[in-house]
Image (cartoon, rainbow, N blue to C red):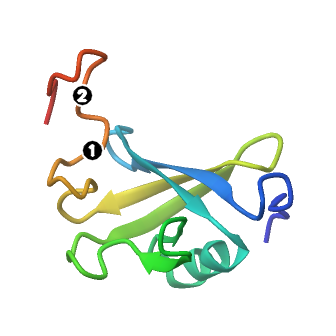
Amino acid sequence: MMQLDFKKQNGLIPCIVQDVDTKKVLMLAYMNEKSYKQTVETKLATYYSRSRQSLWIKGETSGHYQHVKKIRIDCDQDTILLEVEQDGAACHTGHYSCFYRDENGDCVDE
């Protein structure tokens, strides 16, 4: 398993999530070492919730799971890119991607 530098950012690493087929960016979340290891083992995207200070499996309550197909690590080993097969919406608002607004706040795509 690739050595990630969890120490740089208080034990958390940003994780960009992208649709494996369309390459559309779905969301940004954070992982700690435990959530990263669980994601690698289960192939279900598992993140660290900064507000709840606990692990959460994406889709655990909504049914909108993220099935991990590829994991990429950046050159500095402090950012993760997950390519996933998304079940339903990635965003808690019901949008497929969390990045559905433009700079004016208007909904631009779905």
Residue placed furthest toward the front: 51
98 and 44: which one is in front? 98
- 103 is higher (above) or lower (below) than 55: above
**Residue 4: percent from left, percent from top:** 81, 60
Quadrant in which the N terminus appears: bottom right
**Residue 79: percent from left, percent from top:** 68, 48
109 and 7: which one is in front? 7
**Residue 34: percent from left, percent from top:** 67, 80
Quarter-of-image position of residue 98? top left
| Crowd band around label 1 with a 10 angstrom C-alpha radius: few (<14), some (14–19), many (20+) | many
- How far apart are the alpha carbons under marks 1 and 2? 10 Å
Q: Of the residues shown, which amino acid type is indicated by label 2?
A: Arg
| Crowd band around label 2 with a 10 angstrom C-alpha radius: few (<14), some (14–19), many (20+) | few
- 10 is higher (above) or lower (below) than 107: below
For residue 101, which numbered disc appears in the image? 2
CB atoms at circles 1 and 2 under 8 Å apart? no
For residue 73, which numbered disc appears in the image? none
Disc 1 element: loop
Q: Residue at x 31, y 16 (%)?
A: 103
Q: Of the residues shown, which amino acid type is indicated by label 1?
A: Ser
**Residue 107: percent from left, percent from top:** 14, 27
Q: Residue at x 76, y 65 (%)?
A: 11
Q: Residue at x 54, y 59 (%)?
A: 70
Drawn side of residue 78 relative to residue 103, left or right: right
Quarter-of-image position of residue 41? bottom right
9 and 88: which one is in front? 9
Residue assigned mark 1:
97
Q: Residue at x 59, y 58 (%)?
A: 71
Drawn side of residue 90 relative to residue 40, left or right: left
